[in-house]
Amino acid sequence: MKRHIIILLLLVMIASSLPAAEHKSAAKAMLFSAILPGSGQAYLGSYTKAGIFISSEILLLGTTLRLNNEVDWATDTYQQYAFTKVGTPIGSDKDTYQNIQNYISSDAYNADMSHDAWRYFVLGYNDLESYYAYVEANQITGDAAWDWGNDKTWKKYRSYRVDKQNMEMYSNLAVAAVVLNHLVGMIDTALTGKKVRARNKALGNLYINPDLERKGMSFGYAYKF
């Protein structure tokens, strides 16, 4: 008798610890997928899909980290080159690096800036005083001045900048792919949950009820069709 009771208790424990997929929380499954794509599928018992999503996440995260390192390396490269060739301090602001990319020298930049200011202040508003004030405030001289000297050196710097911009674009695409993998994982989790619940409802349900008259437990299986 004791052995039968122990078996019944074990069956009850197993049944309660392994709930049918239709009774699992859809919200919890989607939360798992939002945190780690594939974990929601694993929670629902779809292990093949879980492996695919988790593997994709690992690959995408690895690619993102590698590209981030490439961006840092490319940034260090063009900044070090600018410092070596024209004396631009490492870590200067973005406008400075953009200006030395756009103009071969600070004299060329000043000439272009002065020309634009002349058209705006003098030709547009006949305001010579504002023109001189603007040019004085925005011209680049002294330690901030630069001169690449020749097109070859200047072109090499521009190529370093392009490399950095390309790496940054690839890094952003990798981040977008990670986000997309999470979204697709969540959507697939919702669809997988619906399919599993529908399949389990079609197959039927195991139920356990107490049998007070016989002082035991009764087991049954309901098949739906």
Image: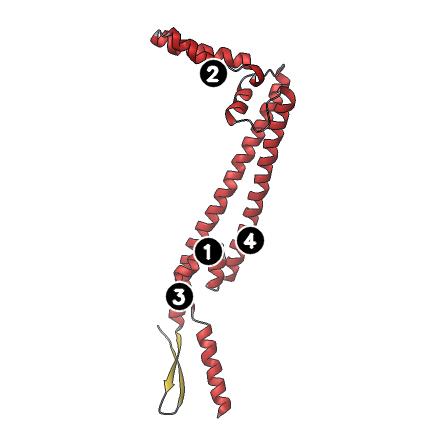
Residue lying at 57% horizontally and 39% vertically, measured from the top left: 68
> Mark 3–mark 4 contact, CB under 8 Å?
no
The three-letter code of the residue at mark 4 reads Ser
Q: CA distance from mark 4 to mark 2?
A: 53 Å
User: Residue 71 or 85: which is nearer the viewer?
Assistant: 85
Nearest to viewer (mark 3 / mark 1): 1
**How busy is the neighbourhood of tag 4: few (under 14 within 10 Å), some, or many (20 plus)?**
few
Q: Looking at the rendering, in which quadrant would you find the C terminus?
A: bottom left
Q: Are marks 4 and 2 in contact (CB under 8 Å)?
A: no
Disc with the residue nearer the chain's start (4 vs 2): 4
Q: Is residue 67 left or right of residue 177?
A: right
Disc 2 secondary structure class: helix
Of pointers 1 and 4, the one earlier in the residue sequence: 1
Secondary structure beneath label 4: helix
Q: For mark 3, what is the residue?
A: 197
Q: Earlier in the sequence, mark 3 or mark 2?
A: 2
Amino acid found under the numbered disc labelled 2: Asn
Q: Position of residue 58 (x, y in %)?
A: 56, 51
* Residue topped by disc 1: 33
Q: Position of residue 170 (x, y in %)?
A: 53, 37
Is residue 105 among the parts visible in the rendering?
Answer: no
